[in-house]
Image (cartoon, rainbow, N blue to C red):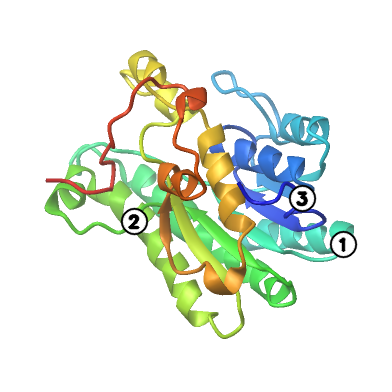
């Protein structure tokens, strides 16, 4: 893995990090010295979901980092700007922007409500655009600026286009925006990459599916995504950009091939938005 202090004194703004993958990334970055500003809606405990933006701050501080909670909606420009302004006021700038907030609904087209469709497009695509846009003026001033989006490689195989078209559209929208940022800001030296899991990750979204218990037993912990994320964010921005990474592949590049500590048993390569025969 990259140097343990590679993120020291760098400031991360991350969306949707009150639990799950986002929280794991924030804690892992904090352990390596990063300051973290969390933008999330969950200010009060949810009856079915653990964690709030305030408990996330406590977790980050327990890991030795500094964090600030901003309660807000990633779909709202003013809320997003407030999170970025908080990072600048409290920590002097923004070095890392992590687009983690995401909504998922995988019902067939005729069963999917317009409300759920709109929610996915607004959180996933609009949210990625708003947070990146607000962070970019400050990222330009950073010595090693990174945008990291939790989104998949763009796979035009008919299987993934057809299995849940609206969700796929929203996630590919996140991917395409990020790859577009990489090209648009290449001369400015701002890295923009995507990161996606090789297999299921044990999150609330997985737990709340009809087969949640079985899926959780076969899932890896969010820490695999966190370890892969901090590895990417520790690399030089100018030479690490425009890529769609997969968590296990990132770790394999640095010699981590035994993934048993992340749980989930013996995983063959899963193909969720990856290759599909």
**Which residue in the rendered view is the most extreme toward the bottom?**
187
For disc 1, the marked residue is 89
| Precedes in sequence: disc 3 or disc 1 | 3
Report the side of 172 relative to 161 (left or right): right
- Total marks drawn? 3
Asked if the residues shown at circle 3 and circle 1 are in contact, with their CB atoms under 8 angstroms apart, the answer is no
Q: Residues within 10 Å of mark 2 (few under 14, many from 20)?
A: many
Name the residue rendered at 34%, 58% in the picture.
172
Report the side of 224 relative to 134 (left or right): left
How many angstroms separate mark 3 from mark 1 (CA)? 23 Å
Q: Quadrant of residue 212?
A: top left
Q: Position of residue 148 (x, y in %)?
A: 55, 58
How many angstroms separate mark 2 from mark 1 (CA)? 35 Å
Q: Is residue 6 above or below residue 262?
A: below
Mark 3 lies on a secondary structure that is loop
Name the residue rendered at 61%, 57% in the picture.
233
Front of the two marks 2 and 3: 3
Mark 2 lies on a secondary structure that is loop
Q: Is residue 257 above or below residue 48?
A: below
For disc 3, the marked residue is 5
Q: Position of residue 103 (x, y in %)?
A: 44, 43
Name the residue rendered at 31%, 19% in the picture.
210
Asked if the residues shown at circle 2 and circle 1 are in contact, with their CB atoms under 8 angstroms apart, the answer is no
| Precedes in sequence: disc 2 or disc 3 | 3
Name the residue rendered at 74%, 76% in the picture.
141
Report the side of 130 relative to 179 (left or right): right
Asked if the residues shown at circle 2 and circle 3 are in contact, with their CB atoms under 8 angstroms apart, the answer is no
Report the side of 234 relative to 157 (left or right): right
* Of 266 and 107, the residue lying toward us: 266
Q: Is residue 266 above or below residue 8?
A: above
For disc 2, the marked residue is 153
* Of 100 and 253, the residue lying toward us: 253
């Amino acid at each position: 893995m990259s140097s343990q202090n590679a993120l020291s004194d760098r400031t991360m703004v991350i969306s949707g990090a009150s639990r799950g993958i986002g929280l794991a990334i924030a804690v892992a970055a904090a352990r390596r010295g990063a300051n973290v500003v969390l933008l999330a809606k969950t200010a009060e405990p949810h009856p079915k979901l653990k964690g709030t933006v305030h408990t996330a701050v406590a977790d980050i501080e327990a890991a030795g980092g500094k964090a600030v909670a901003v309660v807000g909606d990633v779909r709202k420009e003013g809320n997003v700007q407030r999170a970025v302004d908080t990072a600048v006021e409290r920590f002097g700038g923004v070095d890392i922007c992590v687009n983690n907030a995401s909504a998922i609904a995988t019902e067939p087209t005729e069963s999917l409500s317009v409300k759920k469709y709109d929610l996915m497009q607004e959180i996933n695509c609009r949210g990625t655009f708003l947070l990146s846009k607000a962070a970019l003026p400050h990222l330009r001033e950073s010595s090693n600026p990174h945008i990291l989006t939790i989104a998949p490689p763009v796979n035009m195989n008919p299987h993934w286009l057809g299995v849940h078209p609206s969700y796929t559209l929203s996630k590919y929208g996140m991917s395409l925006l990020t790859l577009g940022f990489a090209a648009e800001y290449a001369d400015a030296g701002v890295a923009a990459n995507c990161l996606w899991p090789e297999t299921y990750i044990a999150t609330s979204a997985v737990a709340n599916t009809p087969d949640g218990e079985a899926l959780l037993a076969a899932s890896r912990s969010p820490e695999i995504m966190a370890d892969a994320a901090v590895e990417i964010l520790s690399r030089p921005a100018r030479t690490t950009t425009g890529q769609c990474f997969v968590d296990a592949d990132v770790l394999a590049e640095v010699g981590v091939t035994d993934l048993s500590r992340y749980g989930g048993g013996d995983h063959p390569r899963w193909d969720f938005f990856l290759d599909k025969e």
